[in-house]
Image: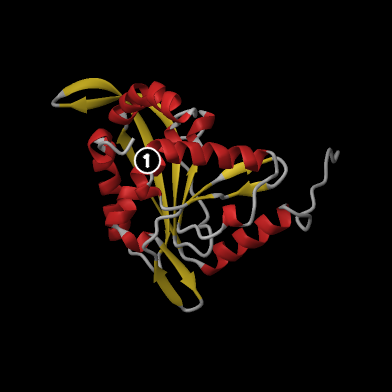
Amino acid sequence: MKVVKTISLKAWPRATISERLSGSYSSRVHVTLHGEFDVSAVKELKKELESIIEGEYSTRLTYTSLFIKLVAHVLRRHLIFNSIIDGDEVKVIDDINISVAVQSERLGLITPVIRNVDTKTLGEVCQQLNDLVNKAREGKISIKDLSEGTFTVSNLGMLGSVDAFTQIINPPQVAILGIGRIVDKPVVIDGEIKVRPLCTFSLTFDHRVIDGYHGAEFLATLKELLEKPREVLGNNI
């Protein structure tokens, strides 16, 4: 057996990632629900707003930004998912601070935080997300950038190779949403076969805090908002 490379699990940043994820997996009861939803309206809205966001905010509109903004509205309706575990207590947080999973060659897997997503415009979310991604890739992320997250979003769909996946909850949070790739598939609508862009959303949560029924409710609300994103965002662009 020829060893090409040896990676130490005790070397930073791998040690930090290993410790946090191992602790989360062993101490939380992970349950994952998957929902495949039509994102036609989101796709159309992205196309409509790309030039507007670029012109007004000098930044690029991504699916991740759109999904984060919509998820903030879902969390406002299902606030138990916006919780942290502190010792023996579950603390439901009013501020919706979404952590976003980012892969950095220098720092490994990190989750910088966009604070108060529900009160920000879509353009502001885009700006902050792109700034955090750039800082992460340059190794310039700060402790403050990684603090006070209340819910995590992980989008592997951008790689174009992952349909659905299970995630490990980002402690001290109680839930995380994984997003797969958008794929055109045949669906039956009013008795006719039509092609629609579909995307699988995978919600993982701590079963000690949240029941499967409430996880299904979360995904049902997400499905509803994905079908009317323009109405949800309104003028908050």
Visual colour scheme: secondary structure
Q: Nearer the viewer, residue 167 or 192?
A: 167
- Amino acid on which the number 1 mark rests in the picture: Thr
Crowding at dot 1, Cα within 10 Å, few <14 / some 14-19 / many 20+, comes out as some
Q: Quadrant of the N terminus?
A: top right
Seen as rendered, the residue at the extreme front is 56
**Residue 5 picture quarter:** top right
Q: Percent position (x, y) of residue 144?
A: 59, 56
Q: Quadrant of the C terminus?
A: top left
**Residue 2 picture quarter:** top right
Please determine whether, in this image, residue 206 is positioned above or below residue 157. below
Seen as rendered, the residue at the extreme right is 2
Secondary structure of residue under mark 1? loop
Q: Is residue 226 visible?
A: yes
Q: Percent position (x, y) of residue 49?
A: 36, 25
Please determine whether, in this image, residue 27 is positioned above or below residue 226. below
Q: Is residue 227 visible?
A: no
Residue at x-position 56% and y-position 39%: 131
Residue at x-position 43% and y-position 23%: 55
**Residue 54 picture quarter:** top left
According to the picture, the residue beneath numbered tag 1 turns out to be: 121
Labels in figure, total: 1
Residue at x-position 68% and y-position 46%: 108
Q: Percent position (x, y) of residue 107?
A: 70, 47
Q: Percent position (x, y) of residue 155?
A: 49, 40
Residue at x-position 26% and y-position 33%: 230
Q: Nearer the viewer, residue 161 or 86?
A: 86
